Structures are given as structure tokens and as C-alpha cells.
Amino acid sequence: MSHTGSLGYGSRYPTRSRRGPPSPARDADAPDIVRKVATATVLGGLVFNAILCFVNTRIMGTADRHVIMAELVIVGCTVLAAMTRKSALYVIFGLFVSYMVFLFMLRGGQVNPKAVRDILIPLAFYFLAMRIADARLADRLVLASGLIVVGFGLFEYLFLPVFLEYFNVIGYYLARGTVTLDQVFGQTKGLFISGQRPEARTILPFLGQHRVSSVFLEPVSMGNFGAIIYAWALFRGREFRLRWVIFLLAFTVIALADARFGLYTCILITLLYPFYSFIPRLVWVVMPFFLLAALAIYGITSVSEGGPNDVAGRFAVTAHILTQLDLGVVLGWETTDAFTADSGISYSLTAFGIFGFVALWSLFVYAPMADARGWRFHSMMIIYLLLLMLISDSFYSIKTGALMWFLVGTASAYRRADAPRSGQSRAATPLSA
């Protein structure tokens, strides 16, 4: 593999020597089994729902407990592989669990294990990647994931009747209890509810109204995945020889799913790419709260409870949901039955309370970097999460979360051969408040 100057385009950092391969700052004692576990769990998180869908369609009935068991196995193996003598993982998880137990007590003993699971997934895959710290392994996982998603997606698009004989998506979600017969108008076989766009496509209209879901079984995660692998290829730049293949795979994924969010995110992170090194972290820390304030004002002044199925309409839905949350829910000591899946920021407030959300978001933004260039990918994922939390809570899903958090951890830990040590690397990142 060729090793040229940067982990991303337009870098203002020195060019690395060609005399040898990079020297990642990884755990020298990590056995090879750890890398194999990383490959198995990242790809497992990607495809296990499709496997369970096949089982439900052709072999035996499945239920939500099978999904929970599969996630427990994947996340449990990831945690075990991520464990080292370093205390950061145990301290962060211990503090988080203690805080959640406190919230559960304030809520009258109502326990929400999903909230704990939602944070355990990022911690597990982030710290596993930090232990391995191998950008080339991440490259291979991105390439393998992209090929799997596009290959499976083309099968769905080109041979839909055959696809449904083996992967009855609606039947799988009915078996899980995720949707009801009323929601699917009595239909027991077919694609997910959003698998057909009622209006004309935005991206490549000649492809028709079918929104491909691939191994994710629903098109929202398909678009999220496209944005994630695009960001990784943009970040890696010339050090990743197959980056143009990843760009092609990313745009194929986005086009097949007619994923407007994925397309807009790719455009925005590209336009902002030259400025990531100059934006202070404090700006990113407070950004969700500027968005909260703006959405709250809009929700209070608007009489609409929603809008058309576009970006503006989704923002209106989020604004309406936010204005319906009681103060006790926002502070964390009360629960609500309100539907918040269409608003990631609203779901986060109901799950963790405002104080927990502030702590978790700040922890993410201020994550340390072994190399200054890792901040570029970190910034792209900050933008991705900021945008996504306005329209969906899908960023908590392991389907895309496993790969995303592994890449975030890799970007944070990976050190080039010529990278400055200790304080020099930190000085080049926008740490100042």
C-alpha cells in the first residue's frame, strides 16, 4: 500500500516519509483473536437482522427476544475484547450505570435497559478500536461492509419477488412486535413500511419508488451507512488506495435508498472539511443546545404538528415533540409515553435527562486524539450526529453504530509514523474552549 502525506484531503500537516509503514499506537500485547473478534462483531452488527429475517421467513419463527440475544452476544464479545488494564472503559461505564440507576430510582423504579444498551454499544466498539488502533483494519471493514450492503441491495432491487421469498421483511418486524397489522394495513409480506416512497424519488427518479434497504431491512439505516463510509474515505485520503471504490459504494447506497439525509450530510461534511481544524470544540459542545432552543421556539410559535415528508417537515415534527415534553421528563426524573423515534434529541432527553445528555455529548466531543488528523473524522461524525438527532433516533442502532463507533475509535487512536508525541498532537487539535 502506498503511504503518502495525509489521512485526509487538503491537510496542512507535514508529509510522512515513504521509508516504512505507519506505526500505530496500539496495544502491543493484544492477541490476534482481538482483531478477529472486531471483524466478526462489526460485520455481525451489520448483518444479524438480515440473518434473523431469513430464519423467520424460511426456518422458524423469531421474536424480539432473539434480537436481544443476538445483540447481547455481539456486544458482550466486543466488551470482552476491548478490556485491558486501562481503567477508562470501566470508569466511564461505571459512572454511567450509576447515574442511570439513580434516574431509575427517581422514576419510581421504572427500569429502561434500552437506555443502558444505547450507550454500551458506543463504548464497546470505541474502546475495542482504541485497543487495536489499526487504520488498515478499519479500511478493510469499510470495504467489506460496503460490498456486502451494495451486493445485498442489488439482489433486493433487481430480484424483489425472489428476495421476498427468502427475506419477508414485514413478516420479520411483525414477529418482533415492532409494527402491528394496523400499521401495515393487514399486509403480512413485503418490504418495510418506508420501503416504497409515496411521492417521486429525489435521487435518480428513473429507479422508481422502491427504496432499497439491503441488510438493514429499512432504508433509513441504509442512508446513514452511506454517509459513514463516505466520511471515512474522505478522511483517509491517499493513504487508502481504494477510497474511490468506497466513494462509489457510498453513492450507490445513497441512490438505491433514495436517502436524502445521506446525500445532504455528504455534501455538508465535504464543504466544511477545510475548517475542522479551526472550529473550537466548545462550539460543537453547545451546538445541540442552540438547536434545541431554535426548535423549541419554532415549536411554540408554530401551530403545525408536522409537515411534508421532507427535511423541513421532519424538523417540524421534532419541534412539536420537544414542546410536548414536560419539565420533569427533560430533567430525567419522569417518564413519558410520547413517540420520540422521529426525534433523536427528544429520545435522548427522555432516556438520559438533560444532565446525562450534556455529559455524554461533552464526553464524545472532548475525546482525546493520538494524532491531530483524527479530529477531522471526529468532526464529520459530530456533524452527522447533530443532523441525524434532529430527524431520527436511528444513530443508536447497532446496525450502523458498530461500524461508526469502531471508526471513531480508530481515528482517535491511530498514530502515523511521523506523528508528534504527547502534547504536540493535542496542540494541533481545537481543544480550546
Image (cartoon, rainbow, N blue to C red):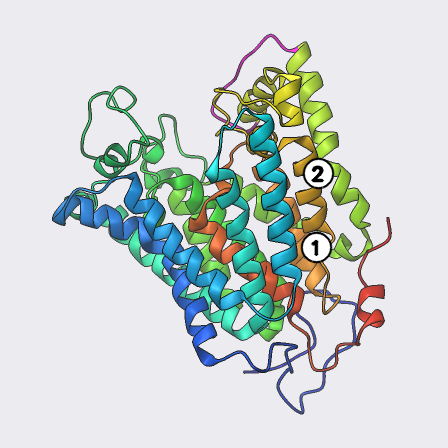
Q: Does the magenta stretch mainly form a helix, a strand or a loop?
A: loop
Location of residue 40 with respect to 404 vertically, above or below: below
Residue 120 in view in this figure? yes
* Secondary structure at numbered mark 2: helix
Q: What stretch is highlighted in magenta?
A: 302-311
Q: Which amino acid does label 2 sit on?
A: Val
Placement of the N terminus among the 4 image quadrants: bottom right
Task: Tell me the tag on residue 273.
Answer: 1
Query: Would you call the spot at circle 2 few (<14 residues within 10 Å), some (14-19), or many (20 or more)?
Result: some
Residue 204 in percent (x, y) is at 41, 42
Q: Distance between the residues labelled 2 and 1?
A: 26 Å
Q: Name the residue under label 2.
A: 358
Would residue 427 be counted in the magenta stretch? Answer: no
Using residue 420 as the reference point, say whether residue 101 is left or right of it.
Answer: left
Residue 164 in percent (x, y) is at 18, 43
Location of residue 185 with respect to 206 vertically, above or below: above
Residue 57 in percent (x, y) is at 16, 44
Residue 228 in percent (x, y) is at 53, 53
